[in-house]
């Protein structure tokens, strides 16, 4: 795999590498210095650079490409670019969950911080609550002009409130834990007794491990929130108004193969 992007992208690439290799009855391999090993209990074999290589490049970003499942076994293959679809690895979900167990040091930090977050909100019996992870991506999807022009969107207050209301109706004991690249915005809009916030001092890996301990998830945009929700399991609500309708990104994005079919689409309206 040609690994590109940050944590959420890299996990998609890793899971898809694993699924595509298994589907083709081939062996998934990574190089010696594979970054995700420091975060997860990755089992894959490391290899020095291989000979006899062909390259497979997906037809469109954010859309499943079935040609990945018919690779010629006479060759070694390098995959690119992002391979962002649950369809590449869904048959091997149990294996992927084993591969994506957090390293003990990260998991221990996350458990400690999760407990501190809840305790700081004066929760007396944390086992009586239903925990909802809320990941809010703003930053580069709001302030980076090329991203905005391409079609990236950010979810607004209404969407998050709609999703929180849905969970509160279903689970009266809902308690919401927010992680974001703009925690100040989250605190300004959602600071209630049944909400708590991670600190921006955490690493991306620790925040993801905190979110993955929750029972259910609300996500806005971006692959980081996607994977936090997938690792958590439970019910997931995602932001339906992504990407911006008619944009260049909208022309290549396939929501059906990007979001798992059991996740719930919700709008800001």
Image (cartoon, helix red, strand yellow):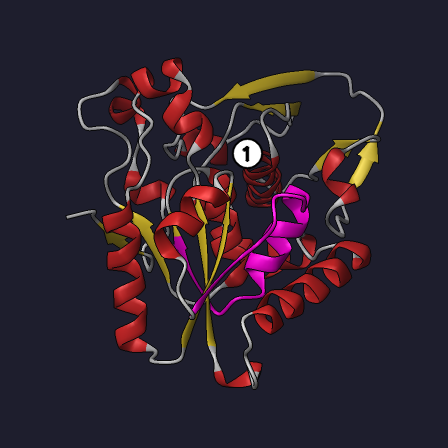
Residue 42, position in %: x, y?
Answer: 75, 48
Residue 251 appears in which quarter of the rendering? top left
Q: Secondary structure at mark 1?
A: helix
Q: Residues within 10 Å of mark 1 (few under 14, many from 20)?
A: many
Q: Quadrant of the N terminus?
A: top right
Q: Measuring from the top left, give residue 108's x and y in whole percent.
A: 77, 63
Position of residue 96 in the picture relative to residue 242 (left or right): right
Looking at the image, which residue is at 24% across and 58% down? 162
Residue 137 image-quadrant placement: top left
Residue at the spot 46% in from the left edge and 36% down from the top edge: 84
Q: Is residue 55 visible?
A: yes
Q: Circle 1 is placed at which residue position?
A: 9
Question: Which quadrant of the view contains residue 243?
Answer: top left
Q: How many marks?
A: 1
Q: Is residue 75 above or below residue 172?
A: above
Looking at the image, residue 170 lies above or below residue 38: below
Horizontal and vertical percent position of residue 95:
63, 57
Magenta segment boundaries in residue numbering: 194-218
């Amino acid at each position: 795999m040609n690994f590109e992007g940050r944590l959420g992208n890299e996990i998609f690439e890793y899971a898809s590498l694993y699924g595509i290799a298994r589907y083709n009855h081939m062996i998934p391999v990574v190089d010696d210095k594979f970054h995700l090993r420091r975060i997860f209990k990755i089992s894959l074999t490391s290899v020095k650079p291989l000979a006899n290589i062909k390259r497979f490049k997906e037809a469109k970003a954010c859309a499943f490409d079935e040609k990945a499942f018919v690779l010629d076994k006479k060759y070694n293959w390098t995959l690119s670019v992002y391979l962002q679809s649950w369809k590449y690895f869904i048959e091997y979900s149990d294996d992927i969950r084993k591969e994506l167990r957090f390293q003990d040091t990260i998991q221990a930090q996350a458990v400690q911080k999760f407990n501190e977050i809840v305790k700081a909100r004066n929760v007396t019996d944390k086992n009586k609550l239903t925990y909802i992870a809320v990941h809010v991506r703003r930053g580069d999807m709001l302030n980076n002009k090329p991203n905005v022009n391409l079609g990236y969107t950010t979810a607004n207050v209404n969407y998050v409130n709609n999703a929180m209301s849905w969970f509160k109706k279903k689970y009266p004991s809902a308690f919401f834990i927010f992680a974001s690249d703009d925690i100040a915005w989250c605190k300004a809009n959602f600071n209630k007794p049944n909400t708590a916030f991670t600190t921006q001092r955490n690493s991306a890996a620790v925040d993801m491990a905190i979110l993955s301990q929750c029972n259910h998830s609300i996500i806005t945009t971006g692959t980081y929130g996607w994977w936090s929700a997938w690792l958590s399991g439970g019910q997931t609500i995602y932001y339906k108004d992504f990407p911006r309708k008619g944009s260049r990104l909208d022309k290549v994005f396939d929501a059906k193969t990007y979001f798992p079919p059991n996740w719930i689409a919700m709008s800001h309206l």
